[in-house]
Image (tube, rainbow, N blue to C red):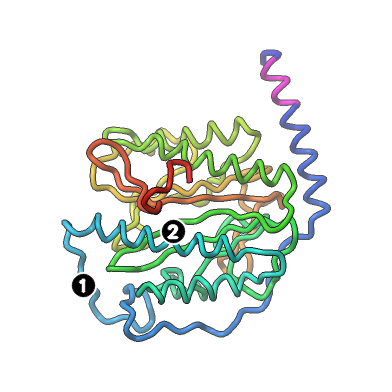
Amino acid sequence: MGKRQEKEKRARRRVASERREHTTRRAPVRAGRLSPDRSVPASIPRPYYAPDAPPFVPAVPPDELADRMRAAGCAGREILLELEDAVAVGMTTDELDRICHEACIARGGYPSPLHYKGFPKSLCTSVNEVICHGIPDDRALADGDIVNCDVTIYLHGVHGDCNATFFVGDVDDEGRRLVQVTKEALWKGIDQVRPGARLYEVGRAIQEHAQAAGFGVVRSFVGHGVGEEFHTAPAVLHYYDPSADLVLTPGLTFTIEPMINEGSWELGRIWPDGWTAPTRDGSRSAQFEHSLLVTATGVEVLTLLPGEPHGS
């Protein structure tokens, strides 16, 4: 090992030690109480997995898919920005769920997470060391927390899926760096999307950026195809694996949603609720997500609003 590599290794160990000390000072996230189920008006079209969905859900004409995905993606983005404005010290994640639920309905959409494989709420809220799939409850957000809000709306027969990690009050410098690097890593991955590219190029770009900053890339959860189905092929790895060699072609729609940990990339024990996924070492985790369409010349970010710049 060269002198430069050895120096970088020692620096990473020092940073990891500082993170462990910070983790021991921060109380771990604990499950709170869930509110009663929220209803969706009968007039709102449902995805097939909703308990009261019709026997058959009409298929989307192929020539309408892109336009419908744009509409659903923009709706999801609008809701995510509403949640960003609402996040504050003392706000409960259940209240964020209510805002998301009502915002979906106001746009004529169904909150996609609700009843998906038994998930009980309309939004995923993942706080601090929770990597993903946190269930909103009556826990109040505390000063210094980070919280990921994962929004998906079923609208016009397709799903618009996006998420972001937000600061709660005064977040320490390392927490802010984690969130910033995670957002940058998402866009490093998006920059690889073009016709003829291999899917592994996305994962390689994300992993290189995150690891250069001293962070770990979660392997247990991945991006996915999205459209008429909430989750479908392809699986979009956020780390390099040469077997992920799918050639990207125009018309393909999928998400990129890297989950980046302060410490180890490893997943801890899933909570008894069957959903909440914490880091193994208790370090914080951040995530950002966009839904994408491969075009004839590159990529369209479906979950950006008109006029929003690249990198948002």
Q: In which quarter of the image is the N terminus?
A: top right
Q: Dot 1 corresponds to which residue? A: 58
Q: Which residue is drawn at 62% across and 63% down?
A: 87
Tell me where residue 147 sits by quadrant.
Answer: bottom right
Relative image position of residue 129 (x, y in whole percent): 67, 55
Identify which residue is drawn at 26% across, 42% down.
Answer: 295
| Numbered disc 1: secondary structure | loop
Magenta residues, as a range?
4-10
Closer to the camera in the image, 77 or 246:
77
> Which circle, 1 or 2, is nearer the viewer?
2
Does 186 appear above or below 214?
A: below
Apparent side of residue 118 relative to residue 33 in the rendered image (left or right): left
Q: Is residue 87 above or below residue 246?
A: below
28 left or right of 62 in image: right
Q: Residue 192's x, y, as percent?
A: 39, 34
Q: Which amino acid does label 1 sit on?
A: Pro
Residue 146's place in the image compared with 37, above or below, is above
Residue 235 percent location from the top left of the image: 39, 49
Nearer to us in this view, 91 or 135: 91
- Position of 119 with respect to 41 (left or right) is right
Q: Mark 2 points at which residue?
A: 77
Q: How crowded is mark 1: few (under 14 residues within 10 Å), some or many (20 or more)?
A: few
